[in-house]
Amino acid sequence: MSVVSSVVVPYTSYLRVYEPLAAFAEPERTHWARYAERPVLPTAQDELRRSLADLVPTPPVGVPVHESGDAFVAELYGVVCVCPWRTRLRGWLALEELEGPGAAGGMFPANVLDALLPSVVRGQARADHERWRERNPDARPWIRTTVWQVPVRWFVLFRDEEREYVAAPDGSGGAARSGGAEGAGGPGGPEGSGGTAAGAGPVLRYRTPMVEARRRLARALRTLRENVAEGPLTEGLVDVGRWLEEFHPHSLVELDYGGLVHALSAEQLAGDRSAADVAEGLAALGNGDGEGAGAAYARLAERWRAVRDRQFTN
């Protein structure tokens, strides 16, 4: 069961790793074991709302003062797996992305960034992160996020038969709702509440065992390196592969469209076969069929261009 709110926070998609309890040292293992038994668990929308609430005070709280004790919970072959939120760590990493490297800056001009998060707030967050990193040099997030898209490299990890789509009860797409599917079992036995709530829909997600995700990524990298020059997709896959190697081999990997479903119609969601397009394109590339690979990529690019364009509409 999950907490459901009437307020929807769009438009973020997620790549998550759920690790078995055995991957955690004590006392954290006991904490997550007890946590997983709770009758009510928060959703991804609840996590976003809590983060956004920190931006309301003056000055805003750019990064939480304390680390979250929450997680998403799922099962793989009957084994309880958890995906810790680690909201504070992800806040620091997001701040680094906002500011960008060097003098060139990041996602926003300096004056806009100062209006969102004053320089004194960002400076304090950087100092806190540096001190924390000295004590936790091997820390990594269990969740990656992006807005207004799902990166192509994420789809490489999954197959179309692992796709789970649950339409909204009224058949609509993203009509002011929160939540998703609870207890939906993926191929090979993944099941559980995950990051989405039951009963409100819509939901679109993929789940696969870690061993399958790593195998597919390795094959995709080999195909790309044998047939095309190094580029952003290859570099992105290498980055995802390094991240996945940090986790327990019996983990569960999930791609969740999250709040992005609220930017898509029911028809778009039902017809979205992005993982199949990526697999088809890679297979064609490996077989020397450049025309087939180009057609698959064109379908994918057009689908996601239409979604990203909505970011700039009124």
Image (cartoon, rainbow, N blue to C red):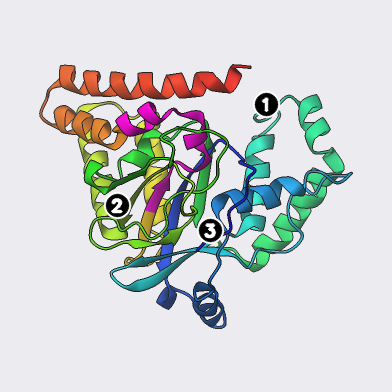
First reached walking from the N terminus: tag 1 or tag 2: 1
Q: What residue type is labelled 1?
A: Ala
Q: Which of marks 3 and 1 is nearer the N terminus?
A: 1
- The residue that mark 3 highlights is 140
Three-letter code, disc 2: Ala
- Packing grade of label 2 (10 A; few <14, some 14-19, many >=20) is many
Checking the image for residue 213, the label placed there is 2
Range drawn in magenta: 254-272
**Front residue of this view, candidates 13 and 38:** 38
In the image, residue 89 above or below residue 170? below
Check disc 1 and report the residue beneath it: 104
Nearest-to-viewer mark from 1 and 2: 2
| Magenta stretch contains residue 294 | no
By secondary structure, the bulk of the magenta-drawn segment is best described as: helix
Q: Which of marks 3 and 2 is in front?
A: 2
Give the amino acid type for the residue marked by disc 3 in the picture.
Arg
